[in-house]
Image (cartoon, coloured by chain):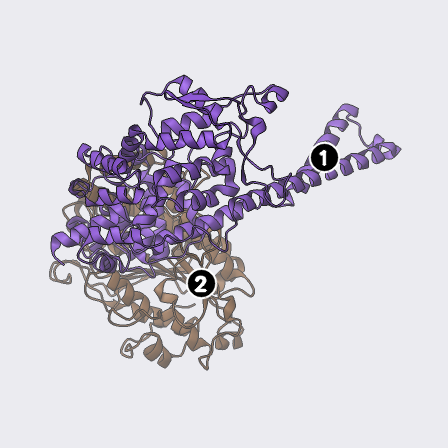
Chain colours: A brown, B purple
Amino acid sequence: MGIVNHLPTRRELLAGAGALFAWSQMPRIARAEGRDPRLLVIVLRGALDGLGAVAPVGDPDWISLRGDRALLLDGKPRALPLDAFFALNPAMPNLHRLYKSGKAAIVHAAATPYRERSHFDGQDVLESGFTRPGATASGWLNRALLAMEGDGRVDPRGSRALGIGSVTPLVVRGSAPVMTWVPQKLLPASEDTQRRLLDLYQHTDPKLATVLQARIKLASLSAGPGTGEAMSDDPTLAPPGIARVRAYFAEAAGTAARYLAKQDGPRVGAMGFVGWDTHIAEGAASGQLYNLLGALDGAFAAIESNIGEAWKEAVVAVVTEFGRTARINGTQGTDHGTGTVAFLIGGGLAGGRVIADWPGLKPAQLLDDRDLRPTTDLRAVLKGLLRDHLRVEENVLADAVFPGSADVKPMAGLLA
Amino acid sequence: MSNSARADAVLALHRFGMGPRPGSMAALGSDPRGALIAELDRPLGLTAAASLPASAKAYRTVADANARRTARAKQAQQQAKKQQIASAAAPDQAEARPEGQAQGYAQEKDAAEMAAKQAADAIPDPGRPIYLQEAKLRTEAALSADLGFAERLVWFWSNHFCISANKIQSMSGAYEREAVRANVLGRFVDLLLAVEGHPAMLFYLDNLESMGANSTAGINRNRGLNENIAREIMELHTLGVRTGYTQDDVISFANVMTGWTLVPPGADPQHGGEFTFNPRLHEPGGQTVLGKRYEQEDVEQGRAVLRDLAAHPATATHVATRLARHFVADEPPPALVERMAKSFRETDGDLKQVAVAMVSSDEAWRAPPAKLKRPSEWVVGMVRATGITQVDPVLYTGGQQLLGEPLWRPSAPKGYPDDEASWIDGVGRRLDVANNFAERVSGMADPQAIIEDVFASEIAGEVKQAVGRAESRQQALALLFMSADFQRR
């Protein structure tokens, strides 16, 4: 149900969102070189457990850290080997294939400069590009767009700026104009949201708890976890389930890719996926997180197949506000942490490797004896992409795009 | 403001108003009861809105469009048949029809019908845009009201005297403005006379079809009575079910109401769709209703019965019960009902005084905030909390439909129910709506600000905690909107 008056169509009623494109003319320098690069940023809101996604199976402390929740090469299901040290969550065969063919890279033990543990503030820092929360006027991707226009003027066709999603993610908000496209599928309330609401009802309103519990049970009957079976065609009637999440991720990302592929289409975009705050029953090997990573993996496949020829000039950066605790908490989940992973995929990458200055998992090696210690500044990765892929100048990156990041050198060699 | 004053203020907004919105706590001041009562003294907008057609005009517009559709369809059908005759005469066409003549005819018939349908569809139904514009202005009145007590009374009485846009879409909004809104703060008898004499109600409850068996038209057409309106007026609108009226009373009253109809739109381009009393349909002679003889020979007969029904003590109790059930509790405190019924009786059905009696009663405030909001109330409360005052009516009415309470489209003359059992199973669906609305507004609505500024922190501690721990603003807003603090009042 949508309500805001500037969103005019019926289908937007059914829209969830979290995706958006910024349209800009092709970066001038890149164009002069005969290139036509694309960049898509996907924000995973809620804080992805990097250790649940990419497990350091070669670390001697790994098993003792996560116990029977540790992903293992001989686990059930088996983690997918990346190199001698890391293995990928088994829910992500597409990412694994891309990695093996050199079209995906993984950065581990990375973090933004934010060291507190509030989602809202963490997302603001991640998306604004500032070192501290509170700056929410514009995002780093938007400022990078402005910079690419050379003299600071935006594309004269700026009114044709295009986006996906009914709310513009902060990362691409700003002076460079944007337009939105809203996925037709209804974004279901995540399992996590339902669980939190159920918990809230159980403490405040038993009757509402009973009703919600019945609905959750219905959803689990009609689509078991991990199954991808088609649900009812009417997205408003289908009970929420992972199938709807998968469909939503695939549609949003796939549509993004289709626009990026167009000859005169946008070249830069951003979208957000929610649901990663896995405090209870994280389920890296078979539950919540496994399902979400599977949906994300499906989104990767949709991007690859829909972007067509442009794949070879495309980079998709998948980032999250912070990581989660290294250890499992008392409710088989993980709490807010620090270091985590970023995924990079695309035909333009020099991939096939996990980029990590591994901090180790011994208690003293953990940050505050709880979090994976961050050893790579996420801004270095993003600056490397912006410099080498979109050709944004380094001084602009240090001042305007990521203010106060002069000490954080752009990571070299990410692009093929 | 003290804690309990703040709690009273929030309760006032949920229970009697449209829900807290930015500035509404300040508008309540330190005397919530007084502020609610004061709102009833201000004029209610929208009874006539420049951008909205009067009911008769809306009705004529749709009737005219329907007539044009019929004409176009007929034309197109004739055209298609002519072409088929011409092509059947051509020998090469006939040979190209190996499956035989029978199927050929069937195809021709289909093609002609298709052509007719396409021609008709080329003329859009003007009823829907009228409905949507009415829905928009009505909703925005609720969103921008400081407190919304008067708007809630409009919603209550509109549902009490419901019609259905499924049957009479063109007039559904105008009916509410002209008959309901204009009278909700006046006397019950005037409200009753306005709604029962409104063309939309007469259309909805089949009174256009009803004629006295001994009336001129009844004899000539060999037609007779339809009891629908008489029964619903007594059962639902006034006395209440099982209050002593008999089947004979229903029949007599139905006879009384014969002739209450509207001017046929085709017959009169100026007044088509307006109320008229047609003596040719009216059952001649006097009638006895509830033991009283009514000898009038015209529209005054019906008005006299309606006046007596309005003044009947059972009506006072019925109305007081329904009001208290809607505003306060599924099982309202008997003392509250009696206080309101007494006010009704003593003030000759002054509805403003009945409303004042309700909010002046301690019982109306002491009942725990346990009543589940109907979807329409919940949605408007959610939107108000964000400060949004303008809506796209397509989205908004679509949302209400999704939640099982499409605007002005109840499935029966009883209107939408007011008890928890009818609505609680739909709470799961509310989560879809809340989740998507939260996503939509997460760029402009701050959950902490809503809790602190709009609700003056009068939100359960568990909810504040859940909001504070949410993984995103969207999730925080969805949890807040779904909390019992938003769902119950």
Whether A195 is drawn above or below B288: the answer is below
A326 sits left or right of B437 in the view: left
The reply to whether residue A146 is visible in this rendering is yes
State the residue at coordinates (28%, 76%): A405
**Mark 1, chain letter?**
B
In the rendered image, which quarter contains the N terminus of chain B?
bottom left
Q: Amino acid at mark 1?
A: Ala
Q: Nearer the viewer, residue B218 or A125?
A: B218
Parent chain of label 2: A
Q: Which residue is mark 2?
A: A21
Give the image location of residue B433, x and y in percent.
36, 46
**The quarter of the displayed image where residue B307 is located:** top left
Residue linked to disc 1: B111
Q: Give the residue type at disc 2.
A: Phe
Image coordinates of residue B144 in percent, x first then y, are 35, 56
Q: Residue furthest front?
A: B295
SS class, disc 1:
helix
Q: Nearer the viewer, residue A138 or B321?
A: B321
Q: Residues within 10 Å of mark 1 (few under 14, many from 20)?
A: some
- What is the distance, in whole Å, between disc 1 and disc 2 at their CAs? 46 Å
Could you say which disc has been placed on residue B64 in the image?
Answer: none
Q: Is B72 left, or right, of B213 in this rendering?
A: right
What's the residue at 73%, 30% (across, down)? B109
Residue A396 lies, with reference to residue B291, above or below; the image says below
